Amino acid sequence: MTAVLGVTTPRPVICLTGQRRRDIAVADAARAGRFTHSGLTLALGRRPDWLHPSGIDDEEWRIEWVKLYEGLDLAHAYAVTGERDYLSTWQDLVDSFCQQVQVGQDSSDISARRLQNWLYAWQSFAAAPAYDGLRPGLAERLLEKIDADARHIAQHLTAQRNHRTLELYTLLLVGLALRDDTRAQDALTALADNARIDIWDDGVHRECSTDYHLIVLRSFVGALANARAAGLTVPDVLLDRVHRGCDFALHVQRPDGITPALSDGDPDDFRDLLAGCAELLDRPDLAWATSAGRRGTPPPDRAVSFPIGGYHIQRSGWGDRGRAYADERFGVFDCGPLGDGGHGHYDQLSVELYGDGGPLVVDPGRYTYAAHGSGWRRWFKGTAGHNTVCMDGLDQTAYRPGKPRDPVSTARLIGRWTIPGLDVVRGEVISPAYDAVHTRTVAFVRDDYWIVHDRLRSAVPHRYSARWHLPADAQGGTTLRAAAAQTSVHTPAGLLVVPAGCGTVGLEEGWVSPAYGVKLPAPVVAVRTAGTNADLVTVLLPGGAPRQSALPPGRGDTPLDTPLQTAVRGQSAGLHPRCPPGAPTRRWTRRANPPPGGNVGASVAVVAAGEDDRVEVTVRRPDGTDTVGWDAGGAPEWLLC
């Protein structure tokens, strides 16, 4: 192999995942020939049958196993303890793999990830104080295998999306490791072109999955870091797309540091990656977000939209407005396309909401890619498995485990209105599965709580269900309390309240998936009604303990100690104060900075009618009063609790 002539040990490359693979328990299990992936542990030995392992029902298990992530754990254990058996275990695994698995046996993306893990583990073993080399002949076989696999990958690149990114990044690393800088520069140039296509202008990755966005971003960031360290010429477009991708990653991160699992993926903590980006890109906003406000500078924006990807973020602050960083409120509204490829869930107009240190409602995740008879792939991908409205039990888009083949549902943003104390986002989804049109308005009130109005319009009757998925810790700790004026659901993370006339509330069995192959029971709050047209309203308040912050100064009750009342007028419905004539009114007003074209302020009035105080939020303009978030043409004033 002339390409590896004279190379006896790979040149070290920068690894961005090493800190994630430092589990000595995983290394000890590998020493015993036990491997855990996708929630399943199998005993296969240290020189296993790589082609035909027994006991696997989900092909995803073997895919993860043959990537040999355990090598990094073994290298860490070897560096810490000096026990040679950790090195011997890794040598047994890679040697048996080289003997059994031919070049091209696995798809290019699987081979690419395995090559990365081999390079990372090998250099980590080599850096350990006790290291004195591999067993005779193994280094040469490994180098030849790495070179041959990389050449096969280059000839069989995936056409597009995240697999292509992974493969090109691997070719860059192999070029650097084998001291072939021309090979590395060619891969870097191709990777930059891939970044230009796959990271849209608003910064969202084309597959519209938050987890895959961060995984892809990690490859682009690793390419940038390795290229700079090796003195390669970094294309401007790669740097530009990394910055844009970091913008989305920054704003979609919850205050607890977790990135929600929107579409295929798992909820995960990517602060280590973004902290590295803060230094690599000189981004003090990333430093702030990854240190919970201990370093850097708070980002200037809280109400942020990514119009191409269709994600709209609501945030009360960055720990810089009198509230602890982890207690800030955070919401993400999905009003965009399914995403390119097969990772998009049927979740349009779904939200995830967080506050007071934990999630209030969550996206359940992905759980599995297996499409066999269990039905779990469909449950986690389908519309009913998300915080949106399900009609007649149907999915917004006809189900397929992978990329849709039939027409898909389409979502669009109708508008966004933001003034101090109020941020309102409205979107619409139209499905090929039914005629009903779903319009959702999400109002974030006083940086504290949300009011969600689901407007359903159809020419024929349907069964409508607004579904709210609670976190796993709500299992066994959630209670429903029905009263004449409203139904409230009390959870460990806060309250969900549905006013009378805005749907019938019930609790259903549900699940959330914190990691692939793992599912935990978690309740679902279902708000149901039936008919041609319907209006469902849900108030969502984070915080397990009673709070006073949702009402203006001087009012001591928690916001939902008093009933909510509703009125329906024509084709519009909303929360509308019904108070007797002459009822006293107290007014509390915040003013926005005058925008171009006129003065806009938020006026919040508490209407006192005996013991039934309610809050009403409107927008005042010089030419009168506009009702934020409602249809034009004199809909009732809305919003309140």
Image (cartoon, rainbow, N blue to C red):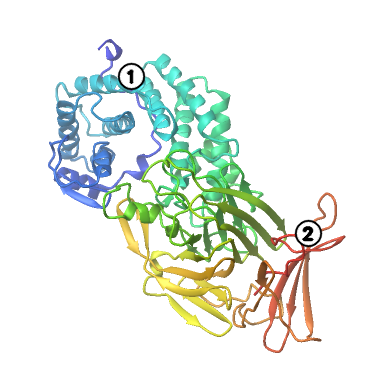
Q: Is residue 311 left or right of residue 579?
A: left
Residue annotated with mark 2: 592
Near mark 2 (Cα within 10 A), the count class, few <14, some 14-19 or many ≥20, is: some
Q: Which residue is painted at 22% across and 43% down in the image? A: 81
The image quadrant where one finds the C terminus is bottom right
The residue shown at (50%, 70%) is 527
Look at the picture and state if 174 lies above or below 94. Answer: above
Residue 530 shows in this picture: yes
Amino acid at pointer 1: Leu
Residue plotted at (40% across, 37% down): 16
**In the figure, 559 relative to 419: above or below?**
below
Q: Which residue in the protein does label 1 denote?
A: 178
In terms of secondary structure, where does tag 2 sit?
Answer: loop
Horizontally, residue 22 falls left or right of residue 541, namely left
Q: For label 1, count other residues whose C-alpha is less than 10 Å away and answer few (under 14), some (14-19) or many (20+).
A: many
Residue furthest bottom in the image = 610
* Left or right: 468 as drawn, with respect to 57: right
Measured as percent of width and height from the top left, residue 231 is found at 48, 20
Outermost residue, right side = 623
Asked if one can make out residue 298 in the rendered structure from this viewpoint, the answer is: no
Task: Please provide percent x and percent y for residue 327.
Answer: 54, 63
Q: Nearer the viewer, residue 534 or 266?
A: 534
Q: Secondary structure at mark 1?
A: loop
In-front residue for pair 321/368: 368
Picture quarter containing residue 318? bottom right
Cα distance between the residues tagged 2 and 1: 59 Å
Mark found first going from the N terminus, 2 or 1:
1
